Image: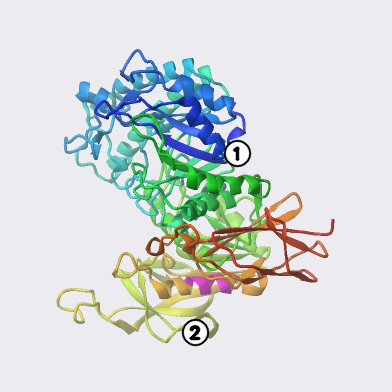
């Protein structure tokens, strides 16, 4: 059983020690004690260090594979432990160009017969003899060194359509089922038939699970190998525990998320926190990426470190070493600036609990029904963007347990629902809860079979739905409060659009289908046919159930896009905000602040006090790259906290202890927050 040290060591770096045989002065300047001391001085408390790289080089003596010219790992583990830095062994699983160059039959083969590669590196097949080869290498590493954890890389496994939101580098191609001779033989043994090259829908699912089984088998063997020597070692792999992960055989959630998509880093942190295990969000320390020497300015490192820290997790920053074994003189400067501050803030950031008004349901089954979770995940991610922009306090929910602690629940284009989950949602609303739904409303059972009618239909105010054949439609102005400030113009919504039948709720807005399908002969200039007022259907419906209420939009709303892929559907996003406001008006929210959308606000609690995080996403804007004192400041802001029960309140900025002007009126606390550059932490306590 692993210890819980990972959660207590939130200042991590990921050092890419890569020293191929063509490099000059290879390893000549490696000094383990000097490097470890540099890490300690930068306030790093855990390092993930390359023990085997993508080239196949093992930086420790090994009986198989390509050994480095001297032992790097032994001295490095010893030196790190001497200065109090935990050591995690990075081990490249899926890339090993040395071994795959010698054994071409170990390469992962795509259905068309081509070898699967990314840049210069070939993917290994984990059903080939390569698996045993790499496990023997891992066994020798674990037997030799008292490492604190193992970080397995390039273990790509997820359904092919999980392309957005993107975590890290893999998407699209990650689900190629290997067609090497080893996989052909294993598939034939298991199923009695050959691997299909052009599979139908059922065969695609069978092939996906076949691929997942191979990865799962390897991960279990790798974990057994590690634990045989290091029972308390933390074991993880890249993108372990993300919503798309069909196995989640990790002690923690490990997510790769890159700048400048700071909302995506926030989503990675929030969805990881919901797993209930320690988590880390990894990002390169260089502007170029993992392979770059062009270090990010200090404000960017501080920003990217602050986002996971505000949610109780770890920021793991990538640092690339030189092939000669040294780090650039300033490689840790920006990290030190960020980590010194994080260390001072740790009493207020670690082991916190979120304070949330809204629960965002994320009910995906990435193993058995992965294809039915794709649009649901995209809509959930889009709701996240809206709620962060609007400073709504919310949590991701992987189950329907304990819904009563939330004032509202969001069910974003939710396809899979069990009867028990439906009953729980009904009880929640009947007891006074609010439900916001879009698009699918429980169209399928957990096994993927379709229901006759959506499971939540009557709860949401209709009895049946069909889907329009067009790929878009136009929402027209409806209930005044919902559309206040929105011009009386058609709001284009991307399909599919649900056509509701047997509506029992109050219709707040309608949707118009196009006059005709968009073809070369029906286009208006280069654009689409207009909406047809004779083909209007209910679109937004509000319904009552017991003491609670529901509001529903008949399509995926938050994730709708325009014809330009990089521009969100602005009016659709605004309408999403209005849906949330209908369910949870401003005056009923735990927190309100007059900050702009680029300010992420995170409210936590710890040891009887509130901990408020404000994070300036504009501080890392790629077009206005901050250098030194050039960060884009935010504030001052007026912030309101509701549901206060502690009498008088004292607030101060951490770690300086600067008092914040505060007033209390019953259950309402008002704060006057001063300007800040990147990350401001405020604690609010009652009478001492």
Element class at badge 1:
helix
Q: Residues within 10 Å of mark 1 (few under 14, many from 20)?
A: some
Is 67 on the left or on the right of 576, as rendered?
left
Camera-side residue of 452 and 493 = 493
Farthest residue in the right direction?
688
Q: Quadrant of residue 92?
A: top left
| Numbered mark located on residue 7 in the image | 1
Is 53 on the left or on the right of 303, as rendered?
left
Element class at badge 2:
loop
Report the residue at 43% width, 79% height from top: 510
Q: Quadrant of residue 535?
A: bottom left
- Per the picture, the main secondary structure of the magenta-coloured stretch is helix
**x, y (%) of residue 621?**
42, 62
Cα separation between marks 2 and 1: 46 Å
| Numbered mark located on residue 485 in the image | 2
Quadrant (top left/top right/bottom left/bottom right) for the C terminus: bottom right
Is 208 on the left or on the right of 109, as rendered?
right
Q: Say which of marks 2 and 1 sits in front.
A: 1
Can see residue 442? no
Quadrant (top left/top right/bottom left/bottom right) for the N terminus: top right
Looking at the picture, does residue 641 appear above or below residue 417? below
Can see residue 124? yes
The magenta span reads 576-582
């Amino acid at each position: 059983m692993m210890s819980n040290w990972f959660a207590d060591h939130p200042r991590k770096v990921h050092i890419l020690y890569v020293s191929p045989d063509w490099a000059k002065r290879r390893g000549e300047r490696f000094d383990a004690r000097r490097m470890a001391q540099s890490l300690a001085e930068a306030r790093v408390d855990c390092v993930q260090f390359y023990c085997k790289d993508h080239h196949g080089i093992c930086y420790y003596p090994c009986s198989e594979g390509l050994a480095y010219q001297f032992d790097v790992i032994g001295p490095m583990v010893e030196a790190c432990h001497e200065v109090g830095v935990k050591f995690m062994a990075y081990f490249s699983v899926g890339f090993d160009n040395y071994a795959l160059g010698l054994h071409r039959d170990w390469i992962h083969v795509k259905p068309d017969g081509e070898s699967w590669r990314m840049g210069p590196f070939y993917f290994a097949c984990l059903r080939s003899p390569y698996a045993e080869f790499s496990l023997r290498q891992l066994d020798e590493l674990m037997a030799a060194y008292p490492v604190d954890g193992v970080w397995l890389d390039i273990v790509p496994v997820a359904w092919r359509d999980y392309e957005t939101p993107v975590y890290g580098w893999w998407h699209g191609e990650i689900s190629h089922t290997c067609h090497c001779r080893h996989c052909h033989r294993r598939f034939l043994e298991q199923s009695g038939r050959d691997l299909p090259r052009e599979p139908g829908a059922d065969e695609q699912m069978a092939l996906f699970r076949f691929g997942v089984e191979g990865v799962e088998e390897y991960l279990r063997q790798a974990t057994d190998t590690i634990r045989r020597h290091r029972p308390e070692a933390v074991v993880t792999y890249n993108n372990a525990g993300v919503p798309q992960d069909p196995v989640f055989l990790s002690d923690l959630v490990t997510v790769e998320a890159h700048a400048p998509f700071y909302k995506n880093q926030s989503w990675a942190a929030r969805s990881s926190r919901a797993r209930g295990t320690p988590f880390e969000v990894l990002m390169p320390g260089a502007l170029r990426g993992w392979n770059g020497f062009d270090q990010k300015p200090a404000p960017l490192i501080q920003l990217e470190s602050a986002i996971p820290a505000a949610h109780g997790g770890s920021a793991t920053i990538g640092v690339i070493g030189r092939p000669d074994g040294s780090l650039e003189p300033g490689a840790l400067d920006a990290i030190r600036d960020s980590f010194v501050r994080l260390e001072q803030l740790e009493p207020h950031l670690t082991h916190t609990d979120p304070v949330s008004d809204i629960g965002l349901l994320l009910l995906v089954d990435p193993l058995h029904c992965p294809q039915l979770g794709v649009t649901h995940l995209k809509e959930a991610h889009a709701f996240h963007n809206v709620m962060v922009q609007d400073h709504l306090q919310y949590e991701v929910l992987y189950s329907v347990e304990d819904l009563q602690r939330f004032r509202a629940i969001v069910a974003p284009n939710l396809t899979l629902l069990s009867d028990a989950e439906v009953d729980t949602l009904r009880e929640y609303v009947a007891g006074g809860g609010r439900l916001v739904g879009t698009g699918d409303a429980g169209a399928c059972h957990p096994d993927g079979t379709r229901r006759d009618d959506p499971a939540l239909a009557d709860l949401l105010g209709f009895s049946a739905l069909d889907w329009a054949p067009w790929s878009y439609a136009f929402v027209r102005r409806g209930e005044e409060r919902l559309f206040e400030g929105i011009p009386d113009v058609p709001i284009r919504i991307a399909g599919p659009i649900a056509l509701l039948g047997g509506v029992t709720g109050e219709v707040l807005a309608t949707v118009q289908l196009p006059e005709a399908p968009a073809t070369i002969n029906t286009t208006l200039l280069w654009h689409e046919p207009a909406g047809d007022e004779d083909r209007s259907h209910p679109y937004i419906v509000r319904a009552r159930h017991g003491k609670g209420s529901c509001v529903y939009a008949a399509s995926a709303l938050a994730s709708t896009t325009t014809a330009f892929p990089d521009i969100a559907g602005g009016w659709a996003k605004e309408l999403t905000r209005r849906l949330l406001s209908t369910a949870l008006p401003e005056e009923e929210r735990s927190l309100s602040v007059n900050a702009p959308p680029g300010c992420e606000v995170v409210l936590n609690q710890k040891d009887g006090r509130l901990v408020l995080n404000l994070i300036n996403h504009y501080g890392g804007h790629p077009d206005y790259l901050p250098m030194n004192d050039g960060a884009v400041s935010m504030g001052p802001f007026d912030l309101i906290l509701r549901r206060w029960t502690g009498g008088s309140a004292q607030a101060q900025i951490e770690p300086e202890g600067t008092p914040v002007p505060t007033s209390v009126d019953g259950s309402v606390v008002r704060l006057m927050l001063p300007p800040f550059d990147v990350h401001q932490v405020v604690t609010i306590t009652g009478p001492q």
